[in-house]
Image (cartoon, grey):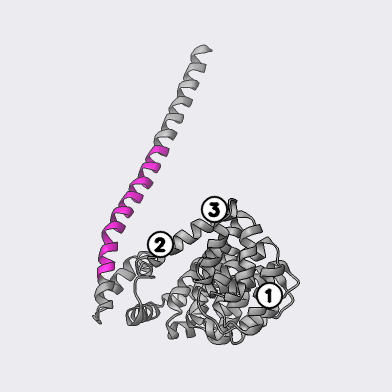
Amino acid sequence: MIRVELSVAACLLGVYALFLIAMFAVLWSKASGRRQHAVTTQGQTPQIRDALVDYLSGSNDQTRIREFLRANRGEMVDTLLQFHGTVGGSARDRLCDLALEMALVHDWCRDAGSKDRLVRRKAYARLSFVCAYEPCRRVAGDLLLRALQDSDREVRLSAARALVQSGSIADLGKVFRLAVSQSLLNRILLAADLRRHATELCAGAVPAVLAGDNAKETIAALQILVAWERAIPLPNLHELLESGNRDVRLEALRLVPLVPLTPENRFSLLRTLREGDEDENTIAALTAGRLRLQEALPSLARCLRTGTAELAANAAAALAEMPPKGWQTLEQIAGGGNTAALIAAVALERARRKAGV
């Protein structure tokens, strides 16, 4: 009996050993295949890149490119997309035209309709690269506009960035309205893309958003305008400077140096320095300094004497930007023996060194 049991156990152990050997063989085969694929890829990518560089340099011979496309379409696409951000002008148009000829753009348009959000993300990211080229934009058609309503925020972002590159003023307005409803990160990315269209947007889409009753979107729009850091023709900013929403007023104050200094804007800024709270005064002091607003000297002196350390430092810096009267005010305050005197003395000394006095 014991001998039979031992025989059965030995058989089971033998079967288990054979199973482990078979599993090891399968895993070894897969690993070898991956290593071979990696070696092959590593060897082909430089060759594909060289072929693309030759083509972008003016060669019309697509023989090697089409061979690579047939042998490994995925690797060809990945290598082509590596040129994103490194080529522009006619070279970029030539690259986009190549993607169109090889039916890659049509593939991406098809993938844009996938129910798999990861597939859609990849498709729209690629379309955002080629849709700066008008023929590619025509192939994409209304896909980009429809994608602004996509449930996935990364898809919305890629579609918006594609529209910024080649869209009409109406499309740019839709992208701006999308931007003010997005997260801070997406808003920053779209703000950078929209910056070169600031003048056109300030003629229509921007005033429309600012005139709306959605305070959150108004604040987001003002943040985008401030991030542009460029002069913009924005009328009626004084209405936002007098808004009943404190956060709207704060963002509007940051924008004052970037718009024409109308009498209404000047009045609102000076009123804020006289009557605003600490945060409003802090921003208003910086703005007055950038504009070298002489009428603000009395209010800046008061902020320096009575404000918090941050407000006093900003007020002193603003006074230092307005010699000789601003310097005279700093000299008077520096004669005291308190914290305000120390801040005034430091700001005055820094201003004199900067001016070489």
Q: Earlier in the sequence, mark 2 or mark 1?
A: 1
Q: Residues within 10 Å of mark 2 (few under 14, many from 20)?
A: few
Q: Label 3's element?
A: helix
Q: Nearer the viewer, residue 8 or 147?
A: 147
Q: In the rendering, at what x and y percent does residue 223 appear?
A: 60, 70
Q: Nearer the viewer, mark 2 or mark 1?
A: 2
Provide the residue designation for mark 3.
Answer: 342
**Residue 109, percent from left and from top:** 50, 76
Q: Secondary structure at mark 1?
A: helix
Q: Position of residue 131 (x, y in %)?
A: 46, 79
Which is more toward the observer, 297 or 56? 297
Disc on the earlier residue, 3 or 2 = 3
The residue at the point 52 percent across, 83 percent down is: 167
* SS assignment for the magenta stretch, majority: helix
> Residue 263, percent across and down?
64, 84
Q: Which mark is residue 241?
A: 1
Q: Tell me which segment is drawn in magenta.
A: 23-50
Q: Amino acid at mark 2?
A: Arg
Question: In which quadrant is the C terminus drawn?
Answer: bottom left
Instruction: Say whether residue 329 is visible.
Output: yes
Three-letter residue code for mark 3:
Leu
Q: CA distance from mark 2 to mark 1?
A: 35 Å
Whether tag 2 and tag 1 are in contact, CB under 8 A, the answer is: no
Going from N to C along the chain, the mark reached first, 1 or 3, is: 1
- What residue is rendered at 44% in x and 80% in y? 132
User: Can I make out residue 216 in this image?
Assistant: no
Three-letter code, disc 1: Leu
Image quadrant assignment for residue 271: bottom right
User: Which quadrant holds residue 65?
Assistant: bottom left
Q: In the rendered structure, find residue 353 and report the number of the disc placed on it.
A: 2
- Is residue 284 magenta-colored? no
* 56 horizontally vs 143: left or right: left
